Image (tube, grey):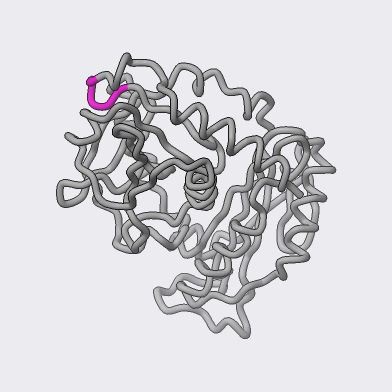
């Protein structure tokens, strides 16, 4: 049985509880992060901690735990649950004021709720899907306008994944004003010639921690990167496509809306970027 963390306590998962009045439950009033674990170490922890602070700040929420203490909780959960490869999920909400109200509770009297748990995923770094590639569909992007804040309101991304599953695909890319924003839980990229193209940072997409690392590694490897909007039709005509996220790292996309990219198998760029990312991230893991 897993050991989880709730508001300062390490507990068996079946003893962990959160109030029915918690605003994360009632209002999706909370933020989250997912940090991957490889070889028993945390990947990109600093990046996730910095983004967490930003998300909290953007929602005017108090930070209930220091970065140093948060690192210790992550490490202790890895140790207690014997995680070699997997993920740690972290969620912070505005807390449980004792009743339901649209108005924010007083942060001096209502403490934030903080929850962490592990997910054991053996073989995470050697995923068969990375060798085969993903099939995606395109769907309309009807989410709220602040996708740069990593909130727990994930209903539409969940619906998007179910749309993809129903269509016999693996995931969906979302389209707004004719342009691809991002995947349901990942950033989206296409490759044309030797150029990697991905949407620039704004309120429209999540500022991916893996995205930042992959683009840095790509530039260091002398690959050309262009941050701009691209259409789904442009994506269908690309040589390659891929996604990045903390849990999939770099994952090739081989089909979009039934149209095969290149030869319908992972190309050259995405597998190489995955290799570089895993190699460099493991070196820097803590």
Magenta-drawn segment: 255-259
At 51% from the left and 44% from the top, the residue drawn is 214
Is 134 colored magenta in this rendering? no
Q: What secondary structure is the stretch in magenta mostly built from? A: strand
Q: Quadrant of residue 169?
A: top left
Residue at 40%, 44% in the rendered image = 187
Q: Is residue 225 left or right of residue 104?
A: left
Q: Residue at x 55, y 43 (%)?
A: 246
Place of residue 131 in the rendered image (x, y in percent of width and height, measured from the top left) = 50, 18
Would residue 156 be found to the left or right of residue 269 on screen?
A: left
Give whichever of 63, 282 is nearer the camera.
282
Q: Quadrant of the N terminus?
A: top right
Q: Position of residue 102 (x, y in %)?
A: 40, 74
**203 over 171 or under it: above or below:** below
Count of marks overlaid on the render: 0
Horizontal relation, residue 72 to residue 280: left or right? right
Look at 55% across and 59% down and name the residue there.
Answer: 20
In depth, the one of 194 and 251 nearer the eye is 194
- Where on the picture, by quarter, is residue 171? top left
Residue 132: image x %, image y %?
Answer: 46, 17
Percent x, y of residue 212: 50, 52
Outermost front residue: 222
């Amino acid at each position: 049985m897993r050991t989880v963390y709730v508001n300062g306590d390490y507990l068996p998962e079946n003893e962990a509880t959160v109030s029915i009045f918690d605003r994360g439950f009632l209002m999706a009033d909370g933020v989250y992060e997912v940090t991957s674990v490889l070889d028993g170490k945390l990947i990109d922890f600093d990046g996730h901690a910095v983004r967490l602070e930003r998300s909290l700040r953007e929602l005017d929420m108090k930070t209930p735990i220091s970065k140093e203490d948060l690192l210790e909780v992550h490490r202790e959960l890895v140790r207690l649950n014997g995680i070699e490869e997997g993920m740690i999920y972290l969620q912070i909400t505005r807390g449980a004021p004792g009743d339901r109200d649209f108005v924010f509770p007083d942060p001096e009297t209502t403490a934030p709720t903080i929850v962490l748990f592990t997910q054991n995923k053996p073989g995470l770094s050697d995923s068969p899907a990375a060798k085969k590639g993903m099939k995606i569909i395109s769907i309309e992007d009807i989410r709220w306008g602040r996708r740069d804040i990593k909130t727990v309101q994930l209903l539409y991304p969940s619906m998007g994944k179910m749309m993809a599953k129903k269509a016999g695909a693996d995931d969906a890319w979302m389209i707004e004003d004719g342009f691809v924003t991002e995947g349901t839980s990942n950033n989206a990229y296409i490759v044309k010639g030797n150029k990697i193209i991905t949407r620039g940072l704004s309120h429209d997409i999540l500022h991916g921690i893996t995205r930042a690392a992959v683009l840095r590694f790509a530039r260091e490897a002398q690959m050309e990167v262009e941050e701009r909007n691209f259409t789904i039709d442009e994506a269908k005509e690309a040589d390659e496509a891929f996604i990045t996220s903390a849990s999939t790292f770099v994952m090739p996309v081989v089909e979009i809306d039934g149209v095969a990219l290149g030869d319908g198998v992972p190309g050259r760029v995405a597998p190489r970027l995955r290799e570089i990312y895993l190699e460099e991230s493991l070196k820097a893991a803590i």
